[in-house]
Image (spheres, rainbow, N blue to C red):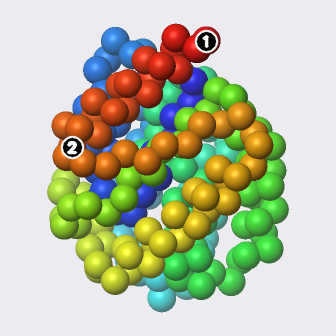
């Protein structure tokens, strides 16, 4: 089972991933973008010339990590990377679409679960000082995430798609219910 959380910054993806009980035995994939941002704090600015390169590296990381691994939960998905690039009017559309097509062939399977977390809380820095808290920018990102989420959902791939809303506690309960249902189906 592969679980991908999708959402703009500050929607609680990392909090949800790290709140999941250990007995589920899912590896947590949550640190690549944070580590990269710590080394390159200015890259998150969409006017930075290296921003597309940053998103491209995350896409390639996702592809390399997610294709061969099973039983994990990730606070990042390919949907997020495409949304950030689309919100910034990326110049790398053709290359990224090729990566998406390749990724889709390997990761949109019956074992995959994609979960969208809408913006329901004020965006805060939380424990990430590198977080971009520009609300207008995050709303553009959220619109793009919804667009890609719907596009991938329409493909008859066998992957499952959910939206979690409500309080953090409610979202965690919903996530646990989704995981338990998936385990029963297997």
Q: Left or right of 52: which side holds 93?
A: right
Q: Looking at the image, can residue 141 be seen? A: yes
> Crowdedness of circle 2 by 10 Å Cα count: few (<14), some, many (20+)?
some
Which x, y percent locates residue 123? 23, 66
Furthest-bottom residue in view? 47
Answer with the quarter of the image where residue 94 lies: bottom right
Q: Is residue 138 above or below residue 110?
A: below
| Residue closer to the observer: 173 or 22 | 173
Q: Looking at the image, can residue 54 be seen? A: no
Q: Mark 2 touching mark 1, by CB under 8 A?
A: no
> Crowdedness of circle 1 by 10 Å Cα count: few (<14), some, many (20+)?
few
Could you tell me which secondary element the residue under label 2 belongs to? helix
The residue singled out by tag 2 in the image is: 168
Answer with the quarter of the image where residue 38 lies: bottom left
Q: Is residue 43 above or below residue 21?
A: below
Answer with the quarter of the image where residue 113 lies: top right
The residue singled out by tag 1 in the image is: 186
Mark 2 vs 1, N-terminal side: 2
| Residue closer to the observer: 116 or 94 | 116
Which x, y percent locates residue 83? 54, 68
Which x, y percent locates residue 121? 21, 61
Q: In which quarter of the image is the C terminus?
A: top right
Q: Quadrant of the N terminus?
A: top right
Q: How far apart are marks 2 and 1 (CA)?
A: 27 Å
Residue at 47% x, 82% y: name it.
Answer: 46
Residue at 39% x, 16% y: name it.
Answer: 24
Residue at 73% x, 57% y: name it.
Answer: 100
């Amino acid at each position: 089972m592969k679980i991908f959380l999708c959402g703009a910054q500050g929607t609680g993806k990392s909090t949800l991933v790290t709140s999941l009980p250990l007995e589920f035995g899912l590896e947590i994939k949550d640190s690549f973008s944070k580590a990269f941002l710590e080394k390159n704090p200015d890259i998150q600015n969409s006017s930075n010339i290296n921003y597309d390169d940053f998103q491209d590296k995350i896409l390639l990381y996702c592809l390399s990590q997610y294709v061969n691994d099973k039983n994990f939960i990730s606070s990042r998905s390919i949907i997020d990377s495409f949304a950030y690039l689309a919100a910034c009017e990326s110049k790398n559309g053709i290359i990224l679409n090729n990566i998406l097509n390749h990724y889709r062939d390997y990761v949109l399977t019956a074992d995959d679960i994609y979960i969208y977390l809408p913006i329901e809380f004020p965006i805060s820095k939380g424990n990430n000082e590198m977080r971009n808290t520009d609300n207008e920018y995050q709303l553009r990102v959220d619109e793009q995430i919804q667009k890609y989420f719907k596009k991938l959902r329409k493909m008859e791939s066998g992957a499952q798609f959910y939206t979690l809303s409500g309080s953090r506690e409610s979202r965690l309960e919903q996530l646990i219910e989704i995981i338990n249902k998936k385990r029963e189906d297997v």
